[in-house]
Amino acid sequence: MTQQPLTLEQFLVAHPPAPPGDPNALAALFSAIGLIGKSLSRDLRLAGLLNILGTTGETNVQGEAVKKLDEIANETFVKVLQQSGVACALASEEMEKPVIVSGQGRRQAPYMVLFDPLDGSSNTDVNMPLGSIFSIVAARSANQPPVEGDLLTRGTGQAAAGYLLFGPSTMLVFTTRAGVHGFTLDPGLGEYLLSHEAIRIPARGKVYAANEGNYHKWPAGTRRYLDSLKQQDKATGRPYSGRYSGCLVADVHRILLGGGIYLYPGEIAKPEGKLRLLYEANPMALVVEEAGGKASTGTKRILDVEPTKLHQRVPLIIGSRDDVAEAETSMQADR
Ligand code: AHG
Ligand code: MN
Ligand code: MN
């Protein structure tokens, strides 16, 4: 008889996070994130039928047009995490200021959650993959409510991180700093089942993901690295295949499973790049490093970047260890 895959709940009981992690609180948090995934996957499946495509007419704190689905996803995250009882602060790409959740009596909830509620928003109107990204950080104090500055924690300080991927199936991929595990939502059962245990990213891949429309805005070292991937060289498996979906989660998920490199580099006129450190780069970096890969700004490890503001942007080069190291060499030689 084939074995029944573990549910998310069973897995968390069997693999409690190491101290100082709080197993019950983290289990409650993952159950909340699982619920968010179910709710969003239902919304996204029906998006073309309900009047929830297109933009709201508003601009968010990032200066980007807000899609109706960005707003729905953000509200879902905030509501469900508030109700979970284990999150004391919520920071989102879509909100200028964090939401502080007041504790019961003097006791504060043990975790803070930072998230990109909907990643790949340009894909909403064309039925292409989307994601959500989350970063979980232990609260500084059990007795004092958190303040905004507490959220400015280096990536190395994350207790857990992961993403939801809304593709042909819905997946939850995460790390509690003991490997990376992938669960697939069985919509009939309403359960996430362990489908990808202990994911390891190959040391080198044959795929690159980058928006090459920006090629002429990049510094010379970045351009030279991209050029090198297209050269013919059997020994190093070149040319690489280009695969870019416009959804960081989907592109990095492909690379996590099969190897390769994703780049959203800095530009000459915009050296900070586009992606956000706290909601996108840090959580994806923790997942990829936990799977044996590497994440860099081009000059520095992502997880070591000191955050100075909530909506800080950072260049992101992430994926297979050897590919990212090679990109760094080229980028550092010629900035
Ligand atoms: P978001 O939808 O949360 O703003 O993120 C979009 C991000 C990322 O998902 C993707 O890789 C990248 O921005 C796409 O940007 P370009 O359209 O500039 O390629
Ligand atoms: Mn995003
Ligand atoms: Mn987003």
Image (cartoon, grey):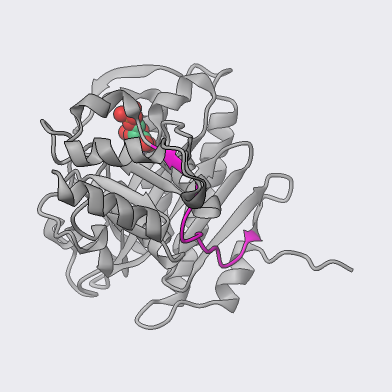
243 displayed left or right of 302: right
In the image, 214 versus 91, the foreground residue is 214
Residue 167 located within the stretch drawn in magenta: no
Quadrant location of the C terminus in the rendered image: top left
61 displayed left or right of 180: left
Vertical side of 198 occupied by 317: above or below: above
Residue 102 visible in the current orientation: no
Q: Main secondary structure of the magenta part?
A: loop
Q: Residue at the location (35% across, 51% down)?
A: 318
Q: Using the rendered view, name the quadrant where residue 60 is placed.
A: top left
Quadrant location of the N terminus in the rendered image: bottom right
The total of numbered circles placed on residues is 0
280 displayed left or right of 266: right
Whole-percent x and y of residue 110? 32, 70
Residue 19 visible in the current orientation: yes
In the image, 328 versus 311, the foreground residue is 328
Q: Residue furthest bottom?
A: 19
Whole-percent x and y of residue 292? 44, 66
Q: Using the rendered view, name the quadrant where residue 132 is placed.
A: top left
Residue 206 located within the stretch drawn in magenta: yes
Q: Residue at the location (25% across, 21% down)?
A: 58
In the image, 251 versus 207, the foreground residue is 207
Whole-percent x and y of residue 275? 26, 41
Q: Using the rendered view, name the quadrant where residue 86 is placed.
A: bottom left
The magenta-colored residue range is 195-209
Whole-percent x and y of residue 269? 10, 30
